């Protein structure tokens, strides 16, 4: 709800439920309001280590990847704020861990399917449509890289897909039943409404901004790589 008591449907509720749980356990205070983000940030560093280890098969490279993530300014900012961004990033990374195992390691375990689809569902429940990125990206990757001989049906486990759909759709079903379609209109307007109508110039400008921001965040590491390359 907003401060005036009106109900808020702009974002899914998972992150707010996590804050309420922290308030119940540790009282209503500034630290409690940040605990979910802090925990998500810490777990994201571990998830980065696990994903990097699967990719490079090297503990050293995985440690470097985890260190880069741990000292990333954006992650630090997200982890000390009461916003769903760190939680979203954690579940997106876990989902990518699952899809990486399914696509590149050719494993068909329940753990990987759970990570892939429940991770995406929880990411969706954290901040909305951005949580679907791992699923969309992984399907698109398989479609455009057919030489890898990974079929789309190899990425699908009916039980885990259904579990993810039920998890992600449960809030929407309850909202529709309790408040009608108006609440969903508020949600989709927040997620999509103003963005397509924005100026076409916003797309390249935002892209440039993201690229510069990434370069700034990686600047210390790029400097160390440059020094190591020279010496």
Image (spheres, grey):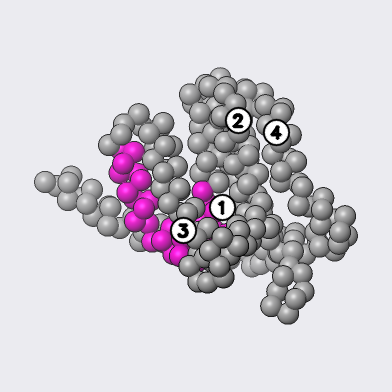
CB under 8 Å between callouts 3 and 1? no
The mark closer to the camera, 2 or 3, is: 3
Q: Residues within 10 Å of mark 1 (few under 14, many from 20)?
A: many
Instruction: Return the residue nearer the eye: 101 or 22.
Output: 22
Give the residue number, with chain letter if any, for mark 2.
113
Q: Where is residue 67 in the image (x, y as percent from the top left)?
A: 32, 49
Question: Is disc 1 placed on a helix, strand or loop?
Answer: helix
Mark 4 or 1 closer to N-term?
1
Q: Position of residue 12 (x, y in %)?
A: 69, 57
* Residue 140 occupies quadrant: top right
Give the residue number, with chain letter if any, for mark 4.
161
Residue positioned 42% across, 37% down in the render: 50
Q: What stretch is highlighted in magenta?
A: 61-90
74 left or right of 230 in image:
right
Mark 2 or 3 closer to N-term?
3
Mark 2 or 4 closer to N-term?
2
Residue 107 lies, with reference to residue 46, above or below; the image says above
Residue 9 lies, with reference to residue 99, above or below; the image says below
Q: How far apart are marks 3 and 4 (CA)?
A: 29 Å
Give the residue number, with chain letter if any, for mark 3.
38
Give the residue number, with chain letter if any, for mark 1.
88
């Amino acid at each position: 709800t907003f401060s005036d008591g009106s109900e808020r449907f702009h974002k899914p509720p998972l992150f707010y439920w996590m804050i309420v749980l922290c308030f119940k356990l540790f009282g209503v205070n500034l630290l409690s309001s940040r605990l979910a983000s802090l925990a998500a940030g810490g777990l994201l560093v571990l998830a980065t280590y696990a994903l990097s280890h699967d990719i490079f098969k090297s503990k050293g490279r995985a440690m470097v990847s985890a260190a880069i993530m741990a000292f990333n300014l954006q992650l630090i900012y997200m982890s000390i704020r009461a916003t769903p961004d760190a939680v979203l990033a954690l579940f997106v990374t876990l989902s990518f861990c699952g899809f990486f195992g399914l696509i590149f390691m050719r494993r068909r375990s329940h753990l990987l399917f759970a990570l892939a689809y429940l991770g995406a569902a929880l990411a969706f429940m954290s901040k909305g449509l951005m949580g679907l990125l791992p699923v969309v990206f992984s399907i698109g990757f398989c479609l455009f890289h057919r030489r890898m001989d990974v079929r789309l049906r190899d990425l699908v486990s009916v039980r885990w897909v259904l579990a993810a759909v039920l998890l992600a759709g449960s809030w929407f079903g309850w909202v529709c039943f309790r408040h009608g379609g108006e609440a969903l209109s508020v949600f989709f307007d927040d997620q999509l409404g103003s963005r397509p109508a924005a100026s076409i110039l916003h797309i390249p400008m935002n892209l440039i901004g993201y690229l510069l921001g990434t370069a700034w965040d990686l600047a210390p590491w790029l400097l160390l790589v440059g020094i190591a390359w020279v010496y």
